[in-house]
Image: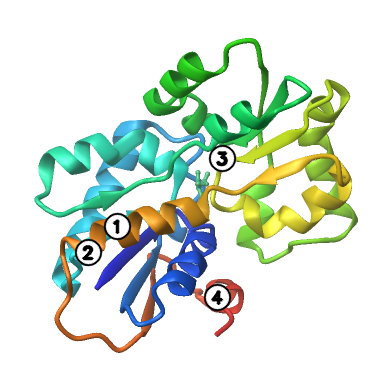
Amino acid sequence: MIGVYDSGVGGLSVWKELVRLMPDQDYVYFSDAAYCPYGPKDPSFIIGRASAVTDFFLEKGCNLIVVACNTATAAAISWLRAHYDIPFVGMEPAIKPAILSSRSGVVGVLATAGTFKGRLYLSTLARFSGDVKVIERVGEGLVETVEKGILDGPEVEALVLRCIAPMLEAGADHIVLGCTHYPFLQPVIERLAGPSVKVVNPAPAVARQAKRLLKAAEPSRRKGSTEFCSSSEDLSVLLRLAGR
Ligand code: DGL
């Protein structure tokens, strides 16, 4: 059984790739909606939540946990790996492939404040940015609109444009989605950015990494099911975005 965890519905963008790649596996999806958003919160608080959710997954019998949240990965994955004897897959900031394939020499990254402060993001940036200009923007308001299930319309366009305009003005040819909520806004982002800008979603690569790790921890019986759980009582948006 694979546990998939996010602060809210965003991790569904990763869960969808996992199910596409491994449809026969059993999943438990946990949305920590009662504490969403994680972006502005203290890492020690997020470690506490990640630990509680991991205990929940272990009780369910999970043998692999996908931290389908960039902010929780930045704050908690080292701690989780040091404290639990179970494999964890975290989100990779996909800035490396974007930097390596940029022709304009300008790359935009949209993420939460917590992700931009993470050690993995900062070290990847220091290692690979070279001459490429990386323009970072916190996606103000984007997580909140996705949590409400509002994925398009004039207000969403205005929010998205405010975030990506500085990237477009600087000539970015890649926009990296550094938060798992943002792929739900990918059609709007692509429409506003235009065809010359490639929007990079790391979820498929994370799903492939989960598949590689799962080989080492083969489960015994599978049904191809997903159980959806949340720390909030209202699961309506979660189930709608999951297509249930
Ligand atoms: N989906 C999350 C991420 O990938 C967290 C968003 C939030 O709760 O602020 O960073």
The residue identified by callout 3 is: 178
Which residue corresponds to mark 2?
215
Q: Mark 3 to mark 4: distance in Å?
A: 20 Å
- Rendering colour mode: rainbow
The reply to whether the residue tagged 3 has its Cβ within 8 angstroms of ligand 1 is: yes
Q: Secondary structure at mark 1?
A: helix
Residue 183 percent across, percent down from the top left: 64, 55
Classify 226 as above or below 164.
below
167 relative to 131 in the view: left or right: right
- Residue type highlighted by circle 1: Arg
Looking at the rendered structure, the kind of residue marked 2 is Lys
- Label pair 1/3, CB-CB below 8 angstroms: no
For the N terminus, the quadrant is bottom left
Asked which quadrant contains residue 153, the reply is bottom right
Q: Which residue is mark 4?
A: 242
Q: Sequence-wise, which precedes: disc 4 or disc 1? A: 1
The residue pinned by badge 1 equals 212
Badge 2: how crowded within 10 Å, few (<14), some, or many (20+)?
few
Which residue lies at the image location 42% right of the left edge and 45% below the top edge? 91
- CA gap between label 4 and label 1 equals 24 Å
In front: 175, or 112?
175
Image position, residue 214 (x, y; %):
24, 63
Mark 3 lies on a secondary structure that is loop
Cβ–Cβ under 8 Å for marks 1 and 2: yes
Quick check: 224 above or below 88?
Answer: below
